Structure formats: structure tokens, C-alpha cells
Image: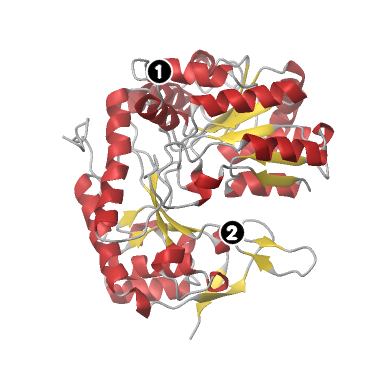
Amino acid sequence: MQFPAEPFRIKVVEPLKITSREEREKLIKEAGYNIFMIPADSIYIDLLTDSGTSAMSDNQWAGLMLGDESYAGSKNYYHFEETVRHIFGFKNVIPTHQGRVAENLLFSNILKEGDVVPNNIHFDTTRANVEYHKAQAIDCVIDEGMDPQNLHPFKGNMDIDKLEAAIQKYGKDRVPIILLTVTNNSGGGQPVSMQNIREVSAVAKKHGIPFFFDACRFAENCYFIKEREDGYQDKTILEIAQEMFSYADGCTMSAKKDGLVNIGGFLAMNDDEWAQRITNMLILIEGFKTYGGLAGRDLEAIARGLKEVLDENYLRFRINQTRFLGEMLDKEGVPIVKPVGGHAVYVDARRFLPHIPPEQFPGQALVVELFIRAGIRSVEIGSLMMAKKDPQTGKMIPPKLELVRLAIPRRVYTNMHMQYVAEAIIEIHREREKLKGFAIEYEADFLRHFTARLKPIA
């Protein structure tokens, strides 16, 4: 079978509320046409994010009952530390309550005003944490990664020439770290090849710059390497992960993705000095170094989830469920980012709604319509989330990609749910000329898409 059935049985079910179109129209208007402001119990299928929305296994739930809530030295921390070291290989393991805190702790300790941080493509919180410290976030993804129709198997790869050019332009003293996001979320959930990882590592070593992963979807990236890269077909996911991390100096991790948990993250690194400084700040703002803002039971769930995510049967279903949704849309002419990524299907809103210009947020128009028509929540990754302000003119510069992400929670929805999502989007696509754009009524200085209020353009 091209798309295998779920490799699990359903033990517990959660009823889903079905609202009327009239109710949804009222809700989205009251929310300022911002999908983040909709109460979750009014959503039928929630594809807003795959972060913290996974269904935990019976083994993880059993682990919760073994939570050691000691303030210092919890046994769950040592299980967590042992697991992270085994998979990731880094010496120092620092727990945090989620990934953006790991980013903030790292950047607070290594960035200064005027620094530059290259990445393949920074995601929203990473970019915001860099810019909050008055540093510059630079995207160095390969050109194929910005072409939604290009079928390059590793569109998340970093362009080595762009990376070298950035280091030459700004000087290595202004580049305190090189990041690589696996898989590349903002570019369509696209993977990074092992060859490219080795090349980035070589550049970092040549210039004496630390090299870190944003590793929140590391297992999905490893599955793509096994599936698409020569020489890895007979390796286990664990072996691929261990090799991948051997080329780096550390990582940030939101365990809410490939940790298969609802809360938690960590920083891991080999540098003892960085680890000590970060740990001191952790104690100040998050908690003692053996819990880092998490309960012991949550640390235990992460340790078990990091082992479960390496299961190839799970990953095969996970990747193919996403592919199943993407191929249903593609077959009916809905423009999507191809090849389909690991954790989400990305609709190309620029081609879906060519009559709506970027300054009127075509992606948000699709997000709103999808909720009104079908009760499905998705998220815009385009001009609302990613546009930059021109320092000279003050005008917003739209990103190269205008996308709507359909992020699929892990082990939550069946393939019948995916079919419902596909049918709803196909129906909208057939009547797409009716959709109108939006204007902003309120926006915050950072991460505006979370709290912005919008109004329809007549």
C-alpha cells in the first residue's frame, strides 16, 4: 500500500464539536479575523500547528505516573539526560519548558547588537528571538527551496556559497553561530541532506564558528535521508540521527514536535562555558537545572517520546499521511509546495489567490475561508507572519513565499479526517475568485500574527 494504515489502535477518544457556518462567521469576526483567537473547542479539525498537539502513547502516559517531583536531582531528569545524550550525543543537556525559551537562553548569552545569524530559513520565533537582541537573521536556503514547484529532494539545504558570502560580508567575529533548521519549516517542511549537513559543518569548522541545529523535527528529517539519500537505506533512524548530530556543536529543541509531548524542550551543547552561563540564566528565569520549568513527569514523557519517534513504522505512517493529503490536493489542481514536506502540507497562496496582492494577505484570506466553510484551523506563513520592514521607507517587504500551512498533529487524526480537509480546500479552490483580502487594524512589534486584528477589504 502506498499510504499504510495507522500503526496504532485508538484507546481513548475526544468528541469534536461541530459548529454551524453562522456560528463560525460570528466567531472569526469577533476574533478580528485572527485564527489564533478562536476557542479550540469551536474547531473541528485543528491544523494550526503540530507543536504540542501530539497524542501521547500509553507508554508515555504510564511514565507520567512515575513522575519524581523533587526540586533537585529528579530521577526523571537523569532518564531524560541519558536519552538526549544517546540520540543527540551532546555533553550538556539543559531542559526548558519549550523551544522558544531554549532559543532565548542561547541568544541572550551569545548575541550582541549587530551580530548576524545565518540559517537555511529562520522560523518565526527563532527570527524574533534573534531580532529582539538587535541581531540580524539571514536566510541562506538554496534557490530551489524558494520555488514551490521544484522537486529537489532536499529543498531545505543551505546554500554554501550564500553562507560563505555572509561570513565574508560581515566577518566571522559578527557571526557567533550558524543554525540549520531540520526540517525547514518556513520553506515547506523540507528536509536537509546529510551531505549538506557535512558541508555546513565544514564551513563552520573552517571559520571557527559554532554550528547548531534547530532540531525539533529531527526524526522526520532522518526519515527523508533514509528514503532519499544514497547510502542510508539500510541504516536505522537512530544511526542516521547520531551521525547527523555528530557534525554539530549543539542544538535547540522543541520536544513538542518530535518529542511527541505537549510541553517541553531543551538546549544541548558541548561547550562547557556556554552551558554554565546558560544554566545560570535558566535558574534565574525557568528553574533549577534538573527541571528547567518542567514537572518531573513531563521530563519522563519526553524521554519516552524521543525513543518512540525513532520507530520507522511510526515515521512511515507520519510522512505518508502528510503525503496522502498533499497528493489529494495536487490531483485536483490545488497549488502546493512540492515535494510534500514531513509535518505539513503547504498551500501556495500566491498561486491559489493571484488576485489578492501580498499587502492584503492572500494566505490569511484562505485561512479565514477554510475556517468559515469547514471549521478547519490552519495558519498563514506569508506576509502577515514573515514580512520585513524596510528601514529606509518603513514599508513592509513581503517574503518570497506566501503559504498556508496545514500542520498535522502526530497520532491524532485519521486519513478520513485528511480526506475531509482535502475536499474543503478543493471546494474553496473552485470558487477562489470570490475571496477578498484583509487589512491590519492592530499589530505588535514582534510576532504580530499571534495577536493582530484584521478587517476585510470591501
Quadrant position of residue 443 = bottom right
Q: Nearer the viewer, residue 199 or 48?
A: 199
Residue position marked by numbered label 1 in the rendering:
231
Q: Indicate the quadrant where residue 340 lies.
A: top left
Mark 2 or mark 1: whose residue is earlier in sequence: 1
Q: Residue at x 76, y 36 (%)?
A: 167
| Residue 162 in view | yes
Q: Of the numbered discs in the image, which one, if any, rests on residue 399? A: 2
Front-lying residue, 57 or 99 = 99
| Residue located 59% across and 73% down the image | 440
- State left or right for residue 139 relative to residue 62: right
Residue 422, image x and y in percent? 26, 57
Mark 2 crowdedness (10 Å alpha carbons): few <14, some 14-19, many ≥20: some
**Residues at marks 2 and 1 touching, judged by CB atoms closer than 8 Å:** no
Label 1, residues with CA under 10 Å away: few <14, some 14-19, many ≥20: few
Left or right: residue 176 versus residue 23 is right
Who is closer to the viewer here, 424 or 175? Answer: 175
Helix, strand or loop status at disc 1: loop
Name the quarter where the N terminus is drawn: top left
In front of the other: 111 or 353:
353
Task: Specify the color scheme.
Answer: secondary structure
Amino acid type, residue under disc 1 in the picture: Gly
The correct choice, above or below, for 33 with respect to 181 in the image is below
Q: State the separation of the CA atoms marked 2 and 1.
A: 36 Å
Q: Residue furthest bottom?
A: 458
**Which amino acid is tagged 2?**
Pro
The image quarter in which residue 20 lies:
bottom left
**Where residue 201 appears, x then y in whole percent?**
63, 24
Q: Residue at x 82, y 36 (%)?
A: 171
In this view of the protein, can residue 111 be seen by the observer? no
Number of numbered callouts drawn: 2
- Viewer-side label of 2, 1: 1
